Amino acid sequence: MLKALGYFIELLKGTGITARHFVVNMWFHTVNLVGIKTKRKGAVTIQYPEQKKELAARHRSLHRLMKREDGKPRCVACMLCATVCPAECIYIEAAEDPDLEIQKYPSIFVIDLKRCCFCGFCVEACPEDAIRMDTAKIDLAQTTPEDLVFGLDKLLK
Ligand code: SF4
Ligand code: SF4
């Protein structure tokens, strides 16, 4: 009997919390709807994909490889990003660059987005600022798994 009463009390508490959130959100939503600006927004419905939410500046979205002024990749194929990647989804093959200052460049640079967990470690590890995740591209769904494997051509776009 006591157990059932305890259960009932918890049920009422939960319902009360849900009701409070509903009323407060509806209040702010209605107030915003009639043009009164408040710090807090009410319930927000975004009509995706027609309407898109503004992403935070530090949001980690699709990777891109940075280019030098002459259009070559800034990457020097040091493998740090591939080494630090917890999902092991970066594959790089290095080739020799005739420029002794650069020494190496990636002849192959592939990121398998099927495995990527968007942790951003690759960006943090890069000593050349050659890889970034600031494209704001988050609609990455593809029709085939192969299309989620991004090579140099897509990453340098
Ligand atoms: S974001 Fe994380 S999981 Fe994805 S490629 Fe970079 S290090 Fe690997
Ligand atoms: S850490 Fe940077 S420079 Fe090194 S291989 Fe990765 S992208 Fe290229």
Image (cartoon, rainbow, N blue to C red):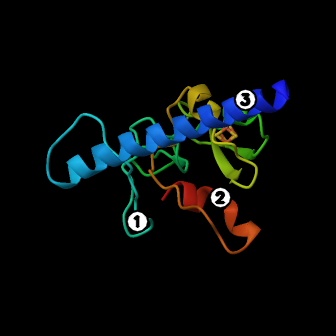
**Mark 3 burial class by Cα count in 10 Å: few <14, some 14-19, many 20+:** some
Residue under the image location 68 percent in, 62 percent down: 148
> Which dot, 2 or 1, sits closer to the camera?
1
Residue under the image location 76 percent in, 32 percent down: 7
- One can see residue 79 in this view: no
In the foreground, 127 or 29: 29
Left or right: residue 39 versus residue 19 is: left
Residue under the image location 53 percent in, 61 percent down: 139
The residue that mark 3 highlights is 84
Amino acid on which the number 1 mark rests in the picture: Gln
Mark 2 or mark 1: which comes first in sequence? 1
Q: Residue 83 shows which numbered tag? A: none
In the foreground, 62 or 55: 55
C-alpha separation, residue under disc 2 versus residue under disc 1: 32 Å
Mark 3 or mark 1: which comes first in sequence? 1
**Residue 75 image position (x, y, % from top left):** 57, 39
> Which dot, 3 or 1, sits closer to the camera?
1
Q: Are marks 3 and 1 in contact (CB under 8 Å)?
A: no
**Residue 138 image position (x, y, % from top left):** 52, 55
Left or right: residue 72 versus residue 31 is: right
- One can see residue 34 in this view: yes
The residue that mark 2 highlights is 151
Amino acid on which the number 2 mark rests in the picture: Gly
* Ligand 1 has an atom within 8 Å of the beta carbon of the residue at disc 3: yes
The residue that mark 1 highlights is 47
In the foreground, 25 or 79: 25
